[in-house]
Amino acid sequence: MEINELWKKVLKILKSETSDITFKTYIKVISPKCIEKNVIYLECPSKYHTEICEQRYLDLITDAVNTVCPNKMKINLQTRNNNVEDTWTKVLNIIKNKLPKISFRTYFEHMEAKFLDEENLCLICKSKRHVSICRNKYLYIIQETLKDVTSKDYNISFDYYLDDDENEENEIWEQCLEIIVPQISKIAFKTYFNVLDVKLVSENLICFKCPSEYHAKICTDRYSDLILNTIKTVTGKDYRIIFEARENVDC
């Protein structure tokens, strides 16, 4: 099977098994390079991106590839030759050592940098609310770190991913995650929370879309009370929540 055709089929699987923000930030931007023997070579846009994908998504990508490909394949993740992205990777690594882990994970892990020209940098955040927080709380540290790395004063602007998809439930869920994350383990966040999509079905019903039936059952059994209590803390309202596998979701 030709590499581009194979990768399109793999992306379709990965889109159904990851959250929207994870797919847009880490999976969709990977480029297929070539197939040699039983190895598929993929290119990531930055060293930081490559490290995250190797740590979190390599097994998922490998499983998706082997679902599509009749022969068992291995994945080799490489970093695209891009000096601009290398600059942002250096900035992130410095900022990572300056901030608490939860702050870095919440506000910087999904951030994308677009150098518009020699003087202007646009940072793409997860949501409109994240833009506000990063602009008000972290702009100075970004400017100073960027200057340390490049010896230049950049004009920094912000944008966000959600655009037309931005809605009330995403804003509520972002606030909830800030409260929930310190209360759960890293593996629980990575496995069960980071892959959830949220949709407000009615005035008092929220539907969480999960990668599988098993995932939905675990979330229902283990995390319903935590999520319900946190939603009430954030909104002051009593909501009902349901967890459904993506392939079964009608909500």
Image (tube, rainbow, N blue to C red):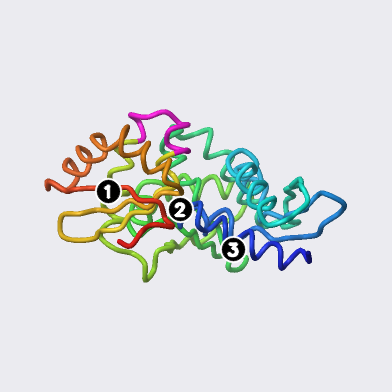
Asked if residue 186 is among those painted magenta in the image, a careful observer would answer yes
Q: Is residue 64 left or right of residue 142?
A: right
Q: Are marks 3 and 1 in contact (CB under 8 Å)?
A: no
Q: Position of residue 120 (x, y in %)?
A: 54, 65
Indicate the amino acid at tag 1: Ile
Q: Are marks 2 and 1 in contact (CB under 8 Å)?
A: no
Q: Nearer the viewer, residue 77 or 127?
A: 77
Secondary structure mostly seen in magenta is: helix
When the figure is inspected, residue 183 is found, relative to residue 44, above or below; the finding is above
Instruction: Indicate which label's residue lies in the foreground, 2 or 3.
Output: 2
Q: Nearer the viewer, residue 146 or 163?
A: 163
Q: Is residue 64 left or right of residue 245?
A: right
Query: What residue does disc 3 label?
Result: 115
Number of disc labels: 3
Which stretch is magenta?
Answer: 181-191
Q: Quadrant of the N terminus?
A: bottom right
When the figure is inspected, residue 50 is found, relative to residue 222, above or below; the finding is below
Query: What residue does disc 1 label?
Result: 242
Q: Which of the marked residues, 2 or 1, is nearer the chain's N terminus?
A: 2
Query: What residue does disc 2 label?
Result: 19
Indicate the amino acid at tag 2: Ser
